[in-house]
Structure formats: C-alpha cells, structure tokens
Amino acid sequence: SAHADQAIACAEAGKHILIEKPMASSVEDCDRILEACDKHSVHSTIAFSQRTRVCNRAAKELLDSGKLGKIHHIRTCQTVPGGMPNLPKWQMEKENLGTLFGHAIHNFDAVRWLTGGEIATVYAKCRSTDPAVTTEGTADVLMTVDTGATAYLLCSFQLPKPGFPRSGYAFQAICENGLLDIDAYGEARASIGGGDWETIAEQEPIDWQGKGALDPVRLESYSLHINDFISSILEGRPPAITGWDGRQAVAAALAAYISNETGEEVRLS
C-alpha cells in the first residue's frame, strides 16, 4: 500500500514517522513498516486522535487509577447521520473497504487502549442500507478481549438525521466497581461504587458552522498527539501511541470483514 511504501522509505532515510490511520491496508504491510522502523531505529506513531480528546483521556485516567476495577464489557459506537454522501467517492468503493476500516478503526483501538488487552476474537455483520453504495455503511461487531472483557461496536454512516444524541463517538463501560458513559464530543460521566453519576470531563462544542474543522477545540487532540511524538523523539522513548497499536487495530478491523464474508467468528493470532 502507499502508506507502507512511503513509511518504509522514511524509515530507510532515518526519519521518525507519523502515519494517518488506518496504518496500512493489510497486516502484512503493517509488519513491513514495523520491521523497517526496528531495523533503522526510528519510531512510528498512528493518528489515533480520539485517545487525546479530553473526555477519553479522563476516562482512561480513571480506569488506570483502579477505582473502577477491571472492565467487564464495553459498548462503543461511531454514528454519522446521513454521512455517506459527504465521504470521498473512493471511500464508497468496495475495494477500498469502508467506514468500519476508515473510521471505526478508532473504536477498535479504544477497546484495546481502555481494557489494556488484546482483541482475541471478532464476529461481524456488515452491510449497506443503500443499494447504490457497494461498501458497507453500517456494521455490528462483537469482540472478546484477552483480559476476559467483551465488546460491542456499532458503526453507521447511514442512519437518518438527526441521529442519536451522544453517539458520534462514544462508549460505555461496565466495570467491577462502577460505570463509564463517554461522549467524546460532549461529556464524560462515571459512577463509582454504586454512587450517583458524576461529570469527570467536558469538551466544548466544536464550532462547525463558523470555524469548521480548524476550530481549536477540535484540533487540540491533534496537537497533544504531535507534541507527545516530538517529546518521544527528544527523550528517546517510545511514543504514547505506537506502530504496534496501529497494527493491532488494522488486524481487528480486517478480521471483521473476514467474519462478515465467512459468517464465522475470527480468532486473531
């Protein structure tokens, strides 16, 4: 893939690499990138910008504190009402995969990141509700994690407007000692030990009509990720988001497509 060829060329030139998600279009290409980075002693990081959004960061910090205990189940979604017509034409062609791979790759990453484990099995059903669209626009995915957790993902760019509230990029977690309810573009809430819901973080609304995609509220997560990547280079440490993270998300997403084709659960090696 173009990502792999370009990333390998950068590694061979001794350059550290920031790669847009998804990392590559195959696990084999991801491995080629990782091998080149290891050979030439350079870092790679993947643009998983959801990890650095304020509500998601707060959720991760609370989980890492141990106050909620182990995660038993995660339900995550990414829904964009009427979103398919706004995608580039190439993203609606089957050979380029679809919204599950191009967008919900964030959600696969979140399952790993939040549970601290690896996705072990994947079972999926993918379809398009529009006969004119040859790639999937709606997908349901069931996963197990090697920590013992289970996860469910809904990705749809085909639901009617106005869509559901708090579901642009969201997740809920059932934990040993509490609950999490996270809307990445709104509010993060937690209930600890059976207590009332508490707000643990809020993101200001993005001014889509005025500032659009360049609104500093939206761009903050990108800045935080890039700053960590720069710091990792200067400090000689791995970045917070690694090439391995990108590889594992690709593996899980591609397993979902295989499961959809075969009708069987796919076990990741």
Image (cartoon, grey):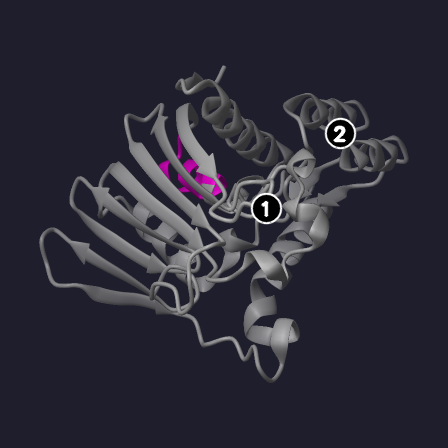
Give whichever of 44, 106 is nearer the camera: 106
Q: Residue at x 81, y 27 (%)?
A: 40
Main secondary structure type of the part rendered in magenta? helix
Q: Where is residue 78 drawn, in percent x and y? A: 44, 52
Q: Is 41 situated left or right of 163 in this image? A: right
**Residue 133 disc label:** 1
The local secondary structure at tag 2 comes to helix
Q: How many marks?
A: 2
The picture quadrant where one finds residue 119 is top left
Give whichever of 51, 155 is nearer the camera: 155
Query: Which residue is identified by label 2?
Result: 37
The local secondary structure at tag 1 comes to loop
Q: Is residue 269 visible?
A: yes
Q: Is 181 situated left or right of 139 in this image? A: left
Q: Is residue 20 visible?
A: no
Tell which tag, 2 or 1, sits nearer the viewer. 1
Q: Which range of residues does the magenta coloring cover?
A: 108-117
Give whichever of 9, 75 is nearer the camera: 75
Q: Where is residue 136 drawn, in percent x and y? A: 53, 41
